[in-house]
Each structure stands twice: as structure tokens, then as C-alpha cells.
Image (tube, grey):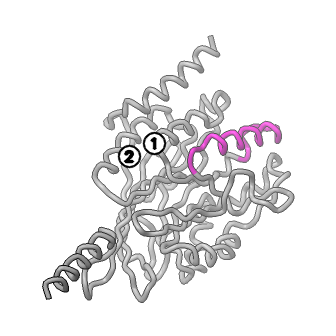
Amino acid sequence: MYKKIAYLVTLAIVIALIIPVGVFAGPNQPQVFNLTIIHTNDFHDYEPYALARKASIIKQIRAEKKNILLIDGGDLSIRGPYHKVFYGELEMAVLNALKYDVWELGNNEFKAHPDQAVTDEKLYNLINQANFPTLCANVRTQAGEYLPGVQPYIVKQVADMKIGILGVTSNKVKKYPQASNKIVEDAFTTVKTLIPEVRKASDIQIVLSHAGLAGDLQIDKDLADSGISFIIGADDHFVIPQPIYRSGGIPITQAGGEDNIFLGRLDLTYENKDGKWVLKSHKGMLYPINDKVPMDTEIKRIVDRFLSKAKSKAA
């Protein structure tokens, strides 16, 4: 009898240890998963030290929350005083230091320079420098392959949950002479084609979009029943403090960009209903980035180093 009791106690302890914290709410209660997404987009033409100010908030959120994704929607650089000096290398060095989880190629990554060969050199340089996955599902080589070093989507493990993140860029890329050596597919059609595959491989599906708000609204309108739980947008530089949402639709957000300097945050709660993870609630916010936000010393040193190089070259 005592052996049986000891066995049951041991079994209960083992079960308690293997059930992930924050995913299982208890017997006869719904399974719940909380996810925080920190998102950035359209860095280009920023005052460089804004990156160090964003870093302070990113680190603060990481200290407060579990189950965090840090993602970027693209357009690291074009325009601005340092574009033709660094071509996004400064920004990528910061993203690496902050350990971003993933980024999507923006349209400006495909027109970094008037010359196609130079643009490709700068594009693949950024892709190769990234210590995290680069997404772009709707641009391919002339051979029909995804661009070297680029994936259409990733499945990211957060706690015991598999988060599928599918990335698309703007249809505008098709019009760029620098991209004439590539096949640019329609962003909406690409999402529609690939999301069933992403859904099979993951518990939660998110679209990281540089297709612009009009493209994101089309995804919301026509693919609301596809399993996509959120669209994190970019390109237009729209300031969307609270996600755009219609009943039964897909919430859409965007964190400004260029002169509208913000850091985006989403706090999402998912519930398991009949074996499928469904977005139960969402809350968005944008942190304004200004001189009231202190600079993170680690990231400031990186910016200092790059700007020092720029001054040395100009001298």
C-alpha cells in the first residue's frame, strides 16, 4: 500500500514538472499561453542613437516578461546621412547585439544602390551578417528558388509552443530595375499558398509583413479563417498604437517608422480550443522614442564605433 502511494506521489511530481508553466491552467480549465512580441520596422533615416534608446526599453521588457519574441519588419536603411556609408551594417550590428529572433526584408533592401550588382552585394551582405533568420517568401531567384540565406517562414520554439512566422515584402519590389533579376510574387497570393503549410508545422501562426497596410487588410479580409492570428506590418510608417481589428478578423499593427520613431509591443493571450490555439485577447502599445528615454550603454558603444568610422573616412 505504501509503495503504491509513494509511486503515485512520484508520478504526480513528474507530471507537474513536465507540464510547461504558462501553458496549462489546471484540470477542467482551458489551456492558456501568453506571448509578448516586441516589434520594430522601417529604421531607415532614423537618428542612429534612437537604436540605443529602443534597446533600453527592449531590455526592460525582457526583464519583466517571459515568452518574448523580438522581430523586425525590414527597411533597415535607405536615405539618411549614413545610408551610403554603412548600407544597413550599423543597424544589423545592433539587431545582432540585441539578439533579434527574425526579420523580414523590406522593399528598400532591394534598391540600396542604383546599380543592380551593388544592390545585390549590399542585400546579401546584410543577410549574411544577420545572426538570426531572414524571411521573404515572395521574392525568388530567376531559377525559382528562395534567395540565398532567406527562408519563407520559420517555426520558433517559445516555451513548449511552436510559433510559425511567415514573411512577405512589398509588391513594389517588382517595379525596381535593381530587382529585375528576381521573381517577385504577389504578397497576398504567397501568404494564401503557404499558410496551410505553416499551420501544419506550428501551434500559432503570425504574418510578418512589409506589404503595407493595404496588403495587410486584404489578408485580413480574405484569409480570416486561415489560422493567422496576427499581422505585424511595416512599410507605410503608420503609427498604430492599438491594433486595427474587426470582429472575426485578424488584428493588424505597425510601429511607425522613419520620422515616426516608436517601439511596438504586443501582449497576446492564446487559448487552446478543441486542440487549436486561438487568440483570446490582445493588447498593443507603442513606446515613443525621444531624448527622455535613456540610451543603453552597450548599444551606444556600437553606434559610437560606427559613427567614429564614418568621421574618419570623411576626414
Q: Is residue 140 above or below residue 215?
A: above
Instruction: Please give the name of the residue rendered at 43% of the width and 63% of the height, measured from the top-left corner.
Output: 158
Instruction: Please give the name of the residue rendered at 44% of the width and 73% of the height, measured from the top-left corner.
Output: 245
Point out residue 277 in the picture as x, y percentages from the top left corner: 43, 79
Numbered disc total: 2
Quick check: marks 2 and 1 in contact, CB under 8 Å?
yes
Checking the image for residue 98, the label placed there is 1
Marks 2 and 1 sit apart, C-alpha to C-alpha, by: 8 Å
Magenta residues?
A: 110-132
Between 241 and 151, the one nearer to me in the picture: 151
Q: State which quadrant residue 92 falls in.
A: top right
Assess whether residue 111 is covered by the magenta stretch.
yes
The extreme top residue here reads 315
**Dot 2 lies on which element?**
helix
Q: Is residue 165 above or below residue 149?
A: below
Q: In the displayed structure, does residue 35 sit left or right of residue 302?
A: left
10 Å crowding of disc 1: few (<14), some (14-19), many (20+): some
The answer to which of marks 2 and 1 sits earlier in the sequence is 2
Q: In the displayed structure, does residue 297 sit left or right of residue 9?
A: right
- Quarter of the figure with the C terminus: top right
Point out residue 52 in the picture as x, y percentages from the top left corner: 42, 35
Checking the image for residue 58, the label placed there is 2
